Image (tube, rainbow, N blue to C red):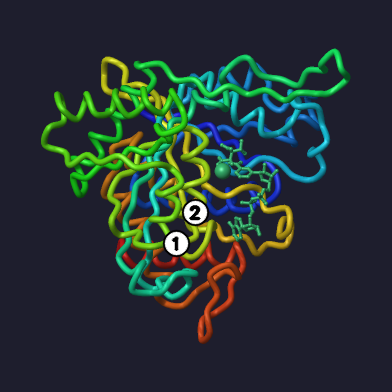
Amino acid sequence: SNSKKILILAGDGIGPEVMGEVKRTLGWFEKRRGSGFETEDGLVGGCSFDKHGVPLTDETMQKAIDADAVLLGAVGGPKWDNLPFKDKPERGLLRLRKDMELFANLRPALVFDALAEASSLKTELVKGLDIMIVRELTGGVYFGSPRGIETLPNGERRGINTQVYTTSEIQRVARVAFELARKRGNKLCSVEKANVMESGVLWREEVQKLGDTEYKDVQLSHMYADNCAMQLVRQPKQFDVIVTDNLFGDLLSDCAAMLTGSLGMLPSASLGAADKGGKRKALYEPVHGSAPDIAGQGKANPLACLLSLSMMLRYSFDQGEDADLLEKAANNVVAKGFRTGDIMAPGCTLVGTKEMGDEILKELDRLAA
Ligand code: NAD
Ligand code: IPM
Ligand code: MN
């Protein structure tokens, strides 16, 4: 069949709450736009540990590999914080990324006009902001070896992680970033710390080589990661596409998230290599976590997860028009003043997760009429 196989891994905390709205919206696209989706639910994170004793089973891992796309909510929470490292909910997510070989993590930071005031920065600094951070996702210090905690002969303990990148790992993620830059503002900023790290020196050299050969048309610059953190809050609109390693990308994308007003607004796509038919393995998830402080209260903002669905429609299924429609609906609902707590402003209407989902569906109906 030509129906699209989607594995849904709602996860922990607010994950299932925001994913509930995604499922309703998927239903809307099936009914109103004739999209053929074949969805299946699975467990990842603490909920999987509770049921199976592991944060991700081999069976679910295989289903993720076989799916056309994976939608993920969030994992983790205080209940599982003291588990041994291998059992932690976060390991489930990291295994998904690693075993699906999702090396390119696209994290857009896009400011909705109506939310420019919700940013902690001055409105004029963020109005119209549209940055894309491309974070390397399967290498670097997250996965490098040696790693671990060891006890030295003198009784001291030592914690070890290793930052390591090969030329091909750098090249493949840089290519994704160069290609994206071409479709956007044609500017790429590569971020590392070549002043203190050999892996950063290699990173800079390899990205520059691609810039000098295959991507001469793209305006390439380099920046140290600490300076980039500063520049993101000083003058964020100087950036178009940023490409960086796994750990710097984690930090810089949370930082960029706050420019948009809330972590609750930011989607992401994690992509693997293209196969012969041009299809990429892909996982879509909000940038935010399981938000234990508000979990179970029905007040999480579902827009980051809904915008991740939009990225899925665009990148995995070539449904660009449907993706536009969903993004337009999200924009309009926020512009009409419907706000979850995290983006609430004076004079706006405070809504919960479900009501926000209702408004999105109403707006989709209106736009499609
Ligand atoms: P978090 O993103 O869960 O929460 C940070 C803050 O943002 C909290 O105050 C939270 O209430 C708020 N927030 C986040 N998403 C929101 C939303 N949709 N609507 C409204 N408010 C929202 O980060 P944290 O507190 O550092 O981590 C909590 C747990 O989540 C940890 O176990 C962590 O490992 C995990 N985590 C998971 C992922 C993931 O699954 N991809 C990402 C980050 C953190
Ligand atoms: C993210 C999260 C994850 C990361 C954790 C939960 C493993 O912070 O997706 O940004 O560090 O990559
Ligand atoms: Mn993070």
Classify 181 as above or below 14: above
- Residue lying at the far bottom of the rendered structure: 347
265 with respect to 288 (left or right) = left
Say which amino acid is labelled 1: Leu
Q: Name the quadrant of the C terminus.
A: bottom left
358 with respect to 148 (left or right) = left
> What residue would you read off at disc 2?
255
Quarter of the image for residue 260 reads: bottom left
For the point 14% across and 24% down, the residue is: 213
- Which disc is residue 323 wearing? none
> What residue would you read off at disc 1?
259
Give the class, few, some or many, for how many residues have Cα within 10 Å of label 1's Cα (few <14, many ≥20).
many
Say which amino acid is labelled 2: Cys
Q: Residue 93 location, x and y as percent?
A: 60, 31
For the residue pair 267 and 135, the one nearer the viewer reads as 135
The reply to whether the C-beta atoms of the residues labelled 2 and 1 are less than 8 Å apart is yes
For the residue pair 23 and 255, the one nearer the viewer reads as 255
Q: Residue 105 location, x and y as percent?
A: 43, 35
Classify 170 as above or below 28: above
For the residue pair 133 and 287, the one nearer the viewer reads as 133
Give the class, few, some or many, for how many residues have Cα within 10 Å of label 2's Cα (few <14, many ≥20).
some
